[in-house]
Amino acid sequence: MVDPFLAANKDRFDRSSKFTLLSQEEKEAILRRARRFARLGLGSLSEVSRRIARRLGRSPETVRYTIKNFDREHPEQALYPDVTGPLDASAKQVIYNSYRRGMDVDTLAKNFQRNRSSVYRVLSEIRAQRLLDLPNDYINNESFEDPVQEGLILSDMPDLEAFEEARRKLRIPKDAPPELISNYEMPLLTKEQEQHMFRKMNFLKHKAAHLLAELKLPSGLINYAKLRVETLDQIEDYLAEANKIKELLIRCNMRLVTSIAKKHSGQAENFFELLSDGNMSLMRAVEKFDYSRGNKFSTYASWAIMKNFARSIPGEIHRRERFLTGNEDVFDAAEDKRTDEQEVLAAAEQASAKVNRLLEYLEPREREIIRMRAGLDSGAEGMTLEKIGEKLGITKERVRQLNVRAMKKLRTIVEKSKDEN
């Protein structure tokens, strides 16, 4: 094993065998060249270090360390004074935000006079701190510590095919208000399905919490010895999957909120404000529900929503009576000519949901062609047949044939839907 490794890395071993400590003359040569580059403004410290290293036959890190060491010992004569000290919190945040907006690491390293490793270290530090600051409450269970059960916990939901089939068959009533469209996008879960999904969501949070605990020292600071990009990616994947399950559980139970809100609508002035308040209670209930007790989630959520209404409705009535102006009838009778932005957005979401539901009846390649042709994913103009063909590796004529066939399928489905309604 050693011999092949030595053969594959011969150049590196040759350089290391010639390693010697820098002489005073070499240090002076490095500083003299660095001083000239700094005076002329030719490149960052990293770039200058690489240039000098190539000229003198030394490693860039050796040259860089020599320059930084000189700047620390002689701050009044520092060649690169902005590089010797640590980055402050605001500079680190600027680096992180710039990277999130698409700026590459090389540009950031040049702008902040740092090497690539320093930039990556800052990005990891900010990511870790953001993850540590996130709330990660979950309902623990003794089965989470059993590695044998991990595969079962992380498996797909029971009767997933039946759930997907029920979701495809859902139809939005024509007279449904835009605010209630989301109620008809997900079917109800069975008790076994919701038990599985609640356990999976909490287990993913449990896994993320264990990794986060390793990143945090008792003092509350980041444990840099454990800071790895792979660990941060894993934590973010766990939390993203847990949030995805949480959203599914919320969407599957939104009709419960509507049903309870309708029973209390006579006591409230605005039904949709009451509905919004109930949805917030539903979100909190998903976080606090202990699936291991064997109860259905709807039982727990109903009490949570009604308890919240019992507090919020009397408070709203008291506020309305206290600030009564005597002109409410005039305001209620006046026509509201303002554009309802929420209604416009809801209508757009309804249209998008209908299109996505129709596309599920197509084969994967047909679906992709329709999306690219109509520009559904990019939000811009659709692609030409030729461009689609280049992307899929087929001819322009074949794309046209598949597009015609897919459109014919969609028209047949729409006509059949109209007949059934």
Image: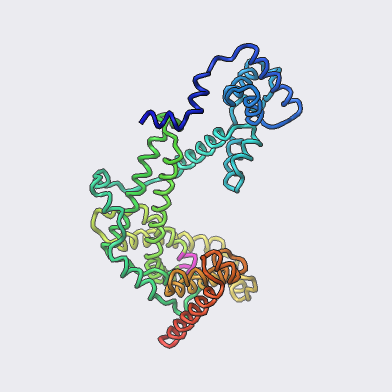
Using the image as rendered, state which of residue 231 and residue 248 is in the foreground: 231
Look at 64% across and 71% down and name the residue there: 338
Using the image as rendered, state which of residue 138 and residue 227 is in the foreground: 227
> Would you place residue 288 above or below residue 409 in this image?
above
Which quadrant would the C terminus be assigned to in this image? Answer: bottom left
Look at 42% across and 77% down and name the residue there: 171
Dominant SS type (magenta): helix
The quarter holding residue 165 reads: bottom left
Whole-percent x and y of residue 227?
44, 35
Which quadrant would the N terminus be assigned to in this image? Answer: top left
> Would you place residue 182 above or below residue 286 in this image?
below
Look at 40% across and 86% down and name the residue there: 420
| Region of the chain picked out in magenta, as a range | 268-275
> Would you place residue 205 above or below residue 371 in this image?
above
Whole-percent x and y of residue 108?
62, 39
Indicate yes or no whether the magenta region holds residue 273.
yes
Residue 372 in view in this figure: yes
The quarter holding residue 362 reads: bottom left
Residue 343 in view in this figure: no
